[in-house]
Amino acid sequence: MDRLKVLGEENERLMRMTRFQILDEVRKIAEVSSQKVEIMEYDSATGENKPTGRYKVVDAMNALNAWDKLGRHFGMFDAKTELQMRKLKAEAESKELETEQRREYGPDTTTINIIDAWADGDEEG
């Protein structure tokens, strides 16, 4: 019965938490889980653990999960943002290509593109 009482009290505490407190708890989990520890190797000659110079993350799975939750909360990883980034990248590449063509062929690149397509054997171009 004591276990149920403890669970009930914990549930009440969680229900009273604000959005800021929850984000702060997730941030703490992310930071603690992301800490690096040096990998030790047992030296049978001396009977001691010696540092290897390599490190590992304390709890990579929880760290990634917590960082992912924070990123999603702030809209960093949602599909809409990703699509917007792809669109911006495509527009930037298009402008870069257009600028490059203007440098190479002059201001009227439409005519040049048709001539290039015809020269490459694409008669429909």
Image (tube, rainbow, N blue to C red):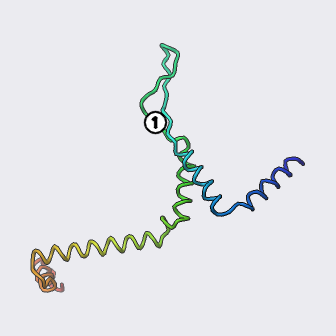
Amino acid carrying label 1: it is Tyr
Classify residue 112 by image quadrant. bottom left
Q: Residue at x 56, y 59 (%)?
A: 69
Residue 17: x percent and y percent?
70, 60
Q: Check disc 1: other Cα within 10 Å, few if <14, some if 14-19, many if 20+.
A: few
Classify residue 94 by image quadrant. bottom left
Q: Nearer the viewer, residue 3 or 13?
A: 13
Residue 24: x percent and y percent?
61, 55
Q: Is residue 85 left or right of residue 119?
A: right
Q: Residue at x 49, y 39 (%)?
A: 36
Q: Residue at x 73, y 58 (%)?
A: 14
Q: Is residue 34 left or right of residue 15?
A: left
Residue 98: x percent and y percent?
19, 77
Residue that label 1 marks: 55
Relative to 119, residue 61 above or below: above
Classify residue 84 by image quadrant. bottom left
Relative to 118, residue 42 above or below: above
Q: Is residue 14 left or right of residue 109?
A: right
Q: Is residue 54 left or right of residue 109?
A: right
Q: Nearer the viewer, residue 84 or 116?
A: 84
Q: Secondary structure at mark 1?
A: strand
Q: Look at the image and tell me in which quarter the C terminus lies.
A: bottom left
Relative to 71, residue 44 above or below: above
